[in-house]
Image: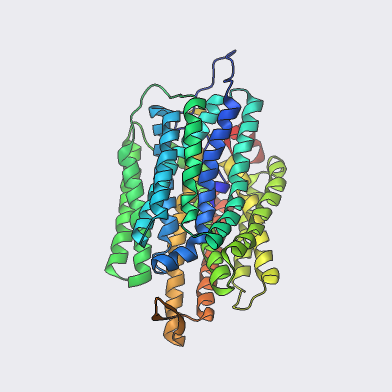
Amino acid sequence: MSDETTTVAGGGADSPAPAAPPGAEPNPRRWVALAVIAIAQLMVVLDATVVNIALPQAQADLGISDADRQWVLTAYTLTFGGLLLLGGRIADYWGRKRTFVVGIIGFAIASAIGGAATNGPLLFTARGLQGAFGALLAPASLALLTVLFTDAKERAKAFGVYGAIAGGGSAVGLVMGGLLTEYANWRWCLLVNIPVAVIAVFAAIPLVPESRAHGDTRYDVPGAVLATLGLVSVVYGFTKAATDGWGATATIGFISAGVVLLAIFVVVEQASPNPLLPMRIILDRNRGGTYLASMLFGAGLFGAFLFLTFYLQVVLQYTPLKAGVASLPVTLGVLIAAGVATPLTPKVGPKPLMVVGSIVAALSMLALTQIGVDTAFATHVLPAEIVLGLGLGLTFVPLANVALVGVPDHDAGAASATLNATQQVGGSLGTALLNTIYTTAITGWVTVHGVVPYPPDNGQPRFGPSPQGLVHGYVTAFAWGAGLLVGSALIILFLLNVRKQDLEHTPGAHAMG
């Protein structure tokens, strides 16, 4: 989901791609190179929504438990979000084309491993590798565009194409995921990346030029390791809560260890001469509030999409294709709201739109708490999806601008990359938390109402919660998701003090998708 809302501006953490010298001739192959970069970006964007639709079938095929299924999503978002800033530095210093090509090849290999997975842990590992290579690919792609397109008008068109793929590709992924899962196999939702990657690599080698930043090229590897391990530990703690309970030693231990690691990360960043995340970026009131709101917003939304997918396919018995098409109204709402928010932001300022957008999204989640076993899609799910999309569009368009308010040019890449990372990290934490809440709610339901027989698996009898029990779990998760979105609105309301005139001097706006 985050891939369709915000993109990373600039290449590295605080070393944006340099502009061409005055009077320099533009690269003659820049538009063909844009097509190659767009193909690679489409592969990454499609993968996010394709896997969402395929998840119910993958879970059943590999025997993944309800408590562990969230790792199919969080393994990707955690590594992507945790390594994104480091990936930007690697692209700048190692070479943007080289990083781009390695990112594509690695993403394809990880997709092949995932497509051939015979158990849950192997699939989780593959998804983690996809996220790691995606963290190389995404910032390298944007840095290459910045280098290739030196004319302001051409650059705006190039980023417009990139942004359209980021937004529209997610909708295509929903339908493609349904088609591949229903008429082939869920594995093809991952394997389809391989031919796309082959085309992109063979086209990139002769067509995309190399470029790199100069000067201090040291990497903040300790920062990247601490941030990623800390986040993984917190998410694993949430997972243990689903199986062992919130008061269990393992649950408290992993969550506590994660918090300690993240605290050490902050200390290391403050002392580092080349920090992965310069503290001056997040200590600003507006930017810090924006990142915190973005994290809570992502936490509520990622979990919502997970349970909406399962509700459509498991309870309403939609085919994967029908479930994919049934999810498209969210994208429609985003497009409508984005068209409204873009001209309104400089007129009324970002804060009112962001508050309204968060509240509207929260109301849509509350509407989803009214679903039932026999709910009609047209009267309950469809309106909630459209309203959710409207809230998304109203929030994320101004959010991207506020993230760059008052940022010096040399920090623009880090500021926008941090926004993307907070969405991914928030999505990871939210998915783990809401899945744990869902599992706890189901356990409570089964304790009171018991289990019902399910169709045999390989001849073995199975028992589980009734459809009413599943809906109880989904509704509980939606309610908590709404609470996270309300929390995002409150942070925006009380912490942000950005005005519309502050947006006039926002750096790097051309690079926002």
In front of the other: 218 or 92:
92
Asked if residue 493 is positioned above or below residue 182 in the image, the reply reads above
Please tell me which residue is depicted at 42% across the width and 69% down the height of the picture: 66
x and y percent of residue 51 in the render?
Answer: 50, 56
Asked if residue 365 is positioned above or below residue 407 in the image, the reply reads below
In front of the other: 7 or 111:
111
Label tally: 0
Q: Quadrant of residue 95?
A: top left
x and y percent of residue 185 in the render?
Answer: 49, 60
Where, quadrant-wise, is the C terminus in this rendering?
A: top right
Asked if residue 460 is positioned above or below residue 140 in the image, the reply reads below
x and y percent of residue 213 in the render?
Answer: 43, 24
**How is the structure coloured here?**
rainbow
Instruction: Specify whether 501 is left or right of 121.
Output: right
Please tell me which residue is depicted at 46% across the width and 75% down the height of the picture: 441
In front of the other: 113 or 137:
113
Asked if residue 385 is positioned above or below residue 408 in the image, the reply reads below
x and y percent of residue 98 in the render?
Answer: 41, 30
Q: Do we see residue 506 in this rendering?
A: no
Please tell me which residue is depicted at 35% across the width and 27% down the height of the picture: 217
Please tell me which residue is depicted at 51% across the width and 68% down the height of the picture: 477
